[in-house]
Image: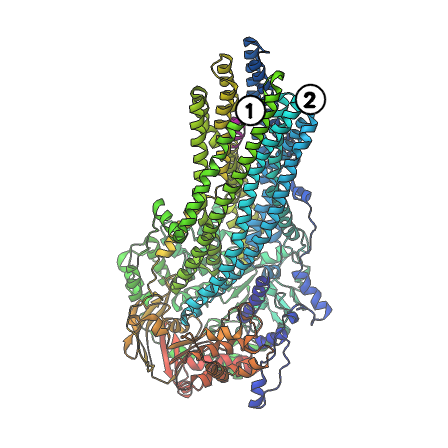
Amino acid sequence: MVVDNDKKRLSKHSNNEVSSIDDVTADHEKATLGQALPSTKNSAALGKLDSKIVTPEQENDTLSHLPVSEREILQRQLEIPTVHVNYFSLYRYSTKVDLVIIAISSFCSIAAGALLPLMTVIFGQLAGTFQGLFLGTLDRDAFNSELRRYSLYFIYLGIGEFVFTYIFTLGFIYTGEHMSGKIREKYLAAILRQNIGFFDKLGAGEITTRITSDSNLVQEGMSEKVGLTMNAVATFVTAFVIGFVKYWKLTLILCSTIVAITLIMGGGSSFMLKFNKASLDSYAQGGTVAEEVLSSIRNATAFSTQDKLARQYDAHLTVAQKWGLKMKMVLACMLAFMMTVVYLNYGLAFWMGSRYLVAGDVNISQVLTVMMAIMIGAFSLGHVGPWVQAFSTAVSAAAKIYSTIERVSPMDPNPTSGDIPDSCIGTIELQHIKHIYPSRPEVVVMEDVSLVVPAGKTTALVGASGSGKSTIVGLVERFYDPVGGQVLLDGHNIQLLNLHWLRQQISLVQQEPVLFATSIYHNIRHGLIGTKYEHLSDEKVKEMVYEAAKMSNAHDFISALPEGYETNVGDRGFLMSGGQKQRIAIARAIISDPKILLLDEATSALDTKSEGVVQAALDRAAQGRTTIVIAHRLSTIKSADNIVVMSEGSIVEQGTHDDLLERRGVYYNLVEAQRIAAATESNDLDENTILVEAYDQNSEKPHGAEVIPDDAEMVGKLHRTKTAKSESSLALRNKREIPAKEYSLWTLIMLIWSFNKAEWHLMLIGLFWSVIAGGGNPVQAIFFAKSLVALSRPPSQYGILRHDANFWSLMYLMLAITQFISWSGQGIAFAYCSERLVHRARDRAFRTMLRQDITFFDEEENTPGALTSFLSTEATYLAGLSGATLGTILVVTTTLVASISIGVSIGWKLALVCISTVPILLSCGFLRFWMLARFQARSKKVYEKSASLACEATSAIRTVASLTREDDVWEQYHEQIVIQGDKSLRSVAKSSLLYAASQSFMFLCTALGFWYGGTLMGKGEYTMFQFFVVFSAILFGAQSAGTIFAFAPDMGKAKYAASELKTLFDRKPSIDTWSQLGEKLNSVEGFIEFRDVYFRYPTRPEQPVLRGLNLAVKPGQYVALVGASGCGKSTTIALLERFYDPLAGGIYIDGKEISNLNIKNYRKYLALVSQEPTLYQGTLRDNILLGADQEEVPEEDIVQACKDANIYEFIMSLPEGFNTVCGSKGTLLSGGQKQRVAIARALLRDPKILLLDEATSALDSESEKVVQAALDAAAKGRTTIAVAHRLSTIQKADVIYVFDNGKIAESGTHNELLARKGRYFELVSLQTLAKTH
């Protein structure tokens, strides 16, 4: 899996970029890419910069550059032991009871398997009895008593089969669930005790997979499949024992069938595997293309490259179709061979049997018994293959799970290990700390930091992001161990203290608080876990919860909610606003009265009004405790006892607020900047104020409660009666949810047919052969009866006997050949149709996805991963309603109709009795396979709920760890597994009844047919020929029909898939890229205007982004947008590209509103260079050409674009030049190189308007210079709008717009804005902080 490594490598890059600042990124990139950086004295050196070719090998050993001691500390936090697992180690956690149940179930499954071939003995004996009557060797009474005796034997077999089957399915499923439940619990317990570094490396997704799918795989390997395998093997062995006992020569000869079946199955399946692998591989490449395109959909949309990319995807589909077709053809031939072998076996048995019979070695009952036993035995082995595969899958899945279970965590919060001091005062000291995150070994985050945090005092940490503030919090909580130095609490090294005890002394409030999906009351109560207050009476606890809520200013808003403290906060607390979540988190942190309080930017994510309230709560909470505060807004930490200014992992200065101001250093500049900005802020009515007024008029406040804006919003949200009177909310209110449509089966069949219309002639051929194939069974019944009659002749007629036997054996040969032709014919015809169907459905689904607007991709269920898997699975399921299913239905119908007609015409009395059993036999055949599929699906379903609980805990592992909630989570999980175990036991007890019935009713139906038919023969109404034709035509016909049904592709899935696809195809996006409507522009000047634009993202309607934005850009101007993150800069670019439409207001280009223009034509004049450059698999030339909007591009245009983008020389220096392959998502190029390719692509379309969305933010300073030079050149003569975090890059801009809260706070040139000492000045000061020391 190349893709995975690339993904991992990519995610490594992206994590770093988020959490470190410019220069750290630079170091990281040097380390990753092994770049020797030349000094940049002159511009000549600029061209040489960033021109190293990245070789992936250099990335392998990331720890090798570190000293041994540091390497060991990091490895200890990361390494996962490899565990050798064999099949029996799956049963590691079984109890004595489990083992007893397994033993009993194994016995029953072997017994049930052995009963099936015993039926052939009775069948043979009965045929002998009939022969006796026919030849007159038995009289009427003796015949009747024999008949009754054998019929009863059948019934006994049926009862035995039922009981044994029921016990073994129930037993194995129960023990499988029980043991896999144990494994799941052990796994979760192991996960919860791991250190945080382990999670940084794994990611929540991988843990989710282990908990859900891997443990399901283990369960499958221990459940009913074990029983079924034993059952099949027992059948096989018994059948052969019976055969050899009855007559060994004939049995040996008939063993050739087994050889044939094994060879066909083996040979065929090896080809199938080969072709299937090839088909999956080429589809995986297609899937990679799809995933690349969908994960960078904004880029594809901006450049209108949907069609080109869809053609690339289609090319992979064509290859996949070729291999898929080969595989299905092999499958069709295999099936045809199997049918042929059955009939050849009958022919051989009668031919050889007749010779032995004439020689006097055997009688008719032996021939029949041997023949049928061999058939049953041979086919029972056929089922074992897929089941055995489940065992090997289970073992490999278990290896992954057990490796985590056996991993010894270097920081195990287990209550027993480590010292527990008698008391905790709360003095924290960092001595010469050097820290490296295990997941990013190339970045040193802290170097030689020493700091004392006195007990009971508040210490504040400030500095640019990535300067190491949050790292201190992580080290105090002991989420990580530092590679150098030590952290002391009251003079004890925290590495020697009991981790559980340590974390109980500390409470943490994070920037993004994590709440669990339960009531507010329980969320706050989580703070008491593990403390001395945990086991107080409910009354006492309630008091503490209310008290904590009052302290954190949360009590009033909670009381105002309809359900008060019992209100569920929703998954991850999404039903609460930011300020409310934060206050609940603070209440949770202070309820246990911790000695140490850590506040990691606890108010940064809030708007000003909630911030005031939360800040007041925090100040109250911090009194008398050791508190470490991390803050971006300096006004919030003025009163701190010590303020520590950090930069790039070391401490620049520290002291009180006043001391630091007197020093006039870094801190002074920061404060100055923020103070001025605060003074110039306009206090106009914003949306929230309007919301509060609406709330005040509509409801009485609780007495004396202060209503806080976001609470009002919340109450409004929960009552759903008040309406917010802001522009955006009014616009949003008009957009109502569209209910999901239900489609009729006919509509869906028509949809599927539309994909296969072109193949109608093939369909007809397939249907014709299906009818022929269906006729095989009834014809066989006549041959069977004729052969038996022939073999029943008395010795005086042995001449005729041999002649007849030879004739009918040849007829069997003829039947075998026709069956081969018809089965393979229908199989191949339908294989072609279904491959075309899947190909077309995938292609159209992908094109339809690319047609959707960006809103569609913002929705949670439409992540690139989900859509890619939708393409691979749903389209494949469609085949379940295509021609192949129709063919199957025809085969079954023909078989039944022909059998019944033959039966009724030859002997109507017996036929009617036999027909009455057809529904039972059909449903037995179908149920047998359907129930097995159900068992599998059910076991997956059962654990969904508990898995979501486990995933919630693991994805919020820091919160769980800091609350010492590990045991609590495990208890809840354990409880759910127990409840689910009981529930599923009841449902399995019912469904196993059906399965057991399907296995045993067959015996009862056979008994009925034999008994009634025999009675009629005894009365002389029927000849032996009539009896056998009617009996075998109808009973065997119905059985085979039922089995075929089960092999039909899953129609339920197909129907669901078809309705999903229909929903997708019917979805008309509001901004439709395929649309031909709208005015087309012939030229564009580049005058851009935003008039009073309001906007909220459709997926987050409660969060205002733009609130009345006004902005004008003149043609040819270079305009920069700056501001804090989340203030609406990138949104402005997205609206200009028309990824979204504003809720109110309009965007105009050259005086025309862009929503009235033809979308494809309008985007032709724009080019976007985004923060993460998107390159696709393919050559550099392919990637650059994606920018062009015409098909044929002259070579010199490409060269010119590359020269302008400063990348031409680099490309020429590569051995393959423009034909160099970029790797998945461009991983073989460095960041700067990718970005310049992206610029070349943008310039190739010669845009009138160039949009730069933080085009250099992810680069190190060296690459940045190169890329910036390219961008400055590109911007000449074009209207350019640049979003920038690094202000140094936009000093030369004609106009700089400073955003704040979705509006323009100020605008002007660099120097004008600096002179004003406002928002912009503050941003500049903040950024110089990182550079000054």
Q: In the rendered structure, does residue 458 fall within the stretch colored magenta?
A: no
Q: Residue 902 at x, y = what percent?
A: 44, 27
Q: Amino acid at mark 2?
A: Asp
Label 2's element?
A: loop
Which quadrant holds residue 1166?
bottom left
- Camera-side residue of 282 and 1080: 282
- Please tell me whether residue 581 is drawn above or below residue 467 in the rendered image: above
Q: Could you tell me what secondary structure mostly forms the magenta stretch?
A: helix
Image-based side of 868 in relation to 967, left or right = left
Count of picture labels: 2
Confirm or deny contact between disc 1 and disc 2 (CB under 8 A): no
Q: Amino acid at mark 1?
A: Gly
Q: Residue 776 at x, y = what percent?
A: 50, 34
- Write down the residue under mark 2: 361
- Camera-side residue of 1184 and 1303: 1184
Residue 744 visible from this viewpoint: no
Q: Earlier in the sequence, mark 1 or mark 2?
A: 1
Magenta part of the chain: 995-1003
Q: Residue 386 at x, y = what percent?
A: 59, 43
Q: CA distance from mark 1 to mark 2?
A: 32 Å
- Write down the residue under mark 1: 158
Q: In the rendered structure, does residue 997 fall within the stretch colored magenta?
A: yes
- Camera-side residue of 1126 and 958: 1126
Quarter of the image with the N terminus is bottom right
- Please tell me whether residue 243 is drawn above or below residue 183 in the rendered image: above
- Please tell me whether residue 381 is drawn above or below residue 1192 in the rendered image: above
- Label drawn at residue 713: none
Image-based side of 891 in relation to 48, left or right = left
Q: Nearer the viewer, mark 1 or mark 2?
A: 2
Quarter of the image with the C terminus is bottom right
